[in-house]
Amino acid sequence: MPPGPLMIIGGAEDKLRRPTILREFVDASGGAEARIAVIPTASSLGDAVVEVYDAVFRKLGAAEVVPVRPESREDAHDADLVARLHGATGIFMTGGNQLKLSSIISGTPLGEAIHEAHRDGVVVAGTSAGASIQSSHMVAFGGPGATPKQRMTQVAAGLGLLESAVIDQHFDQRNRYGRLLMIVAQSPQLLGIGVDEDTAAVVTESDGRQLLRVSGRGSVTIFDPARMVTNAYEAQRSSPLLASGVTLHVLPEGATYDLTARELLPQQWAVDPEDEAELAEAQHDMRQMARDIAAGDASPAALRRRLARTRSRLQPHRQDGDDR
């Protein structure tokens, strides 16, 4: 069995009007049979944040929502608390302080239970802080800015569900380009992944390949520093860093990136079956018209009637979905 999907959410996901990402999480967790464990440790809001996600997940059809809230490393060793993850079909880590979350659960039985659940096919999702902790390396804290500068951020160890990567969130909204570039300049073996708000990087594994698919209204930005030239090893204090040769990918919804091969996959466009049938019929009419014209055995009136029928079939599609 392949590991379960990772849903890396950039924060501020829509919970009311169009909860597309959270609906995808509930559906992936089993829909009406979903048993979701919520880990709110990163948040300072405590039980209130659990109540919000409990209400959202149940409204979206989940059967059960279970809070798992360690507040210390001792709690994360508690067998009864760890047992709450058993039988979960989805695990969701809320936003807040990612360093607090990492300090409490990384390297504990609870952290290992999350790894075990992931290996067994359980969906693991996290928003904001809960997104950052999923990678092997994690932004602990740091300021905004588009220019990478020495010491502008600090890195800590994450859970390592996604290896050889560092994840940042609220990426475009909080202008975090510089700090992610600083990290990959200092550690060019890491892939830098920045996720916008109300956007998810959904990572699945198949045949030994890890694929990242983008869902939501924003983008996922990837910095591949494999061929980077940098002066990070000698730059002083807070000076700007040299970062040349970084491969940049900005991926909107529907784009898929091969994390294993580090390359963008061709876009697959889905066509509605009803639209496909009507377009095929229209194409047939147009080809017949071309044959009639070439043969010279169709009257102008007959050609006009056939063209009018073709246009009438295509017109509703233009009104509904074509903005040109």
Image (cartoon, rainbow, N blue to C red):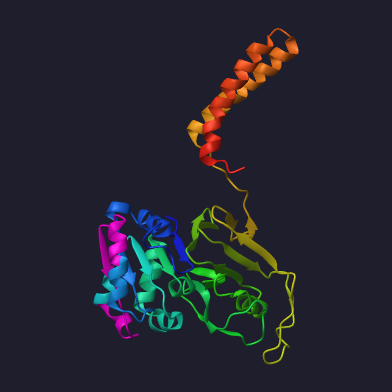
Q: Quadrant of residue 81?
A: bottom left
Q: Percent from the top left, x then y, of residue 303?
A: 65, 15
Is 231 inside the magenta-drawn segment?
no
Q: Quadrant of residue 233?
A: bottom right
Q: Is residue 127 left or right of residue 268?
A: left
The residue sitting at 35% across, 82% down in the picture is 44
Q: Is residue 150 left or right of residue 139?
A: right
Q: Is residue 29 left or right of residue 182?
A: left
Looking at the rendering, the stretch of residues picked out in magenta corresponds to 54-79
Closest to the observer: 268 or 295?
Answer: 295
Q: Percent from the top left, x then y, of residue 83?
A: 26, 71
- Which quadrant holds the N terminus? bottom left
Is 65 inside the magenta-drawn segment?
yes
Q: Is residue 19 shown to the viewer in this render?
A: yes
Q: Percent from the top left, x then y, of residue 9?
A: 47, 66
* Vertical arrangement, residue 34 with respect to residue 134, above or below: above
* Vertical arrangement, residue 117 with respect to residue 183, above or below: above
Q: Percent from the top left, x then y, of residue 273?
A: 49, 33
Q: Is residue 88 shown to the viewer in this render?
A: no
Closest to the observer: 184 or 304?
Answer: 304
How many marks are shown on the rendered structure?
0
The residue sitting at 31% across, 86% down in the picture is 74
**Name of the residue lying farthest toward the bottom:** 237
The residue sitting at 48% across, 77% down in the picture is 158
The residue sitting at 61% across, 66% down in the picture is 222
Closest to the observer: 233 or 241?
Answer: 241
Closest to the observer: 286 or 73?
Answer: 286
- Which quadrant holds the C terminus? top right
